[in-house]
Image: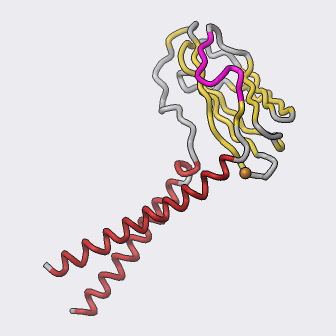
Amino acid sequence: MSARTLLVRPATGAAALVAAVLAIVVALVQPAQAHTGLVSSDPGADSTLAEEPGEVSLTFSEEVQGSAFVVAKAPDGSRVDTGAQSVDDKTIRMQLASAGFAGTYLVSYRVVGPDGHPVEGSIEYDVTNGRTAPEAQSPVVAESFVQRHRGPLVAGSVGVLAVLTLALWSRKRADD
Ligand SMILES: [Cu+2]
């Protein structure tokens, strides 16, 4: 009875600690994304086009520093960004290849603003003319900072739990 109560309480405490750590990480990440932001795009976010565009342009609130990272994916998950990219002040242009599919296209970007902070996000647009795309291999979703760092965060949480469990276990042995 006593051993069981001992095990349950620190586990709840550890979960609260993990939640607190995650909340801090999220709070630290949010302001960095608020500095430079996407103002407009062509095609516009969530717009519907008859034909595939030959180019996508992304305009930000501040001057884009250095090179930008832009990936465009067709409804089947294949890449349509060509690598032919130009950055002019606040606007990035990426030439697109034609995939020939109707459906939802996703453009993900990662740029660096004047304050040196990376900014990332994505837009989607629909194309009505084209073949029906086969199922994408995996959901086409832009990864957030937390998603990209989920591995280390989970490892850290597991580590915290392991240390607490071990501490509890040694205390219990010392009692015996
Ligand atoms: Cu910033």
Whole-percent x, y for residue 162 in the image: 38, 72
Magenta segment, principal secondary structure?
A: strand
Residue 96: % across, % down: 72, 21
Q: Residue at x 54, y 51 (%)?
A: 146
Magenta region, residue range: 40-49
Which sits in the foreground, 175 or 44?
44
Tell me the quarter of the picture where residue 149 sits: bottom right
Front position in the image: 57 or 151: 57
**Colour convention of the picture:** secondary structure
Q: Is residue 158 left or right of residue 11?
A: right
Quarter of the image for the N terminus: give it: bottom left
Decide which of 161, 29 is in the foreground and name it.
29
Question: Is the C terminus in the top left, top right, bottom left or bottom right quadrant?
Answer: bottom left
* Residue 68 x, y percent position in the rendering: 76, 39
**Position of residue 62 in the picture relative to residue 154 (left or right):** right
| Position in image of residue 34 (x %, y %) | 67, 46
Q: What residue do we see at 83% from left, 44% from top?
A: 65
Q: Is residue 60 toward the left or the right of residue 8 in the image?
A: right
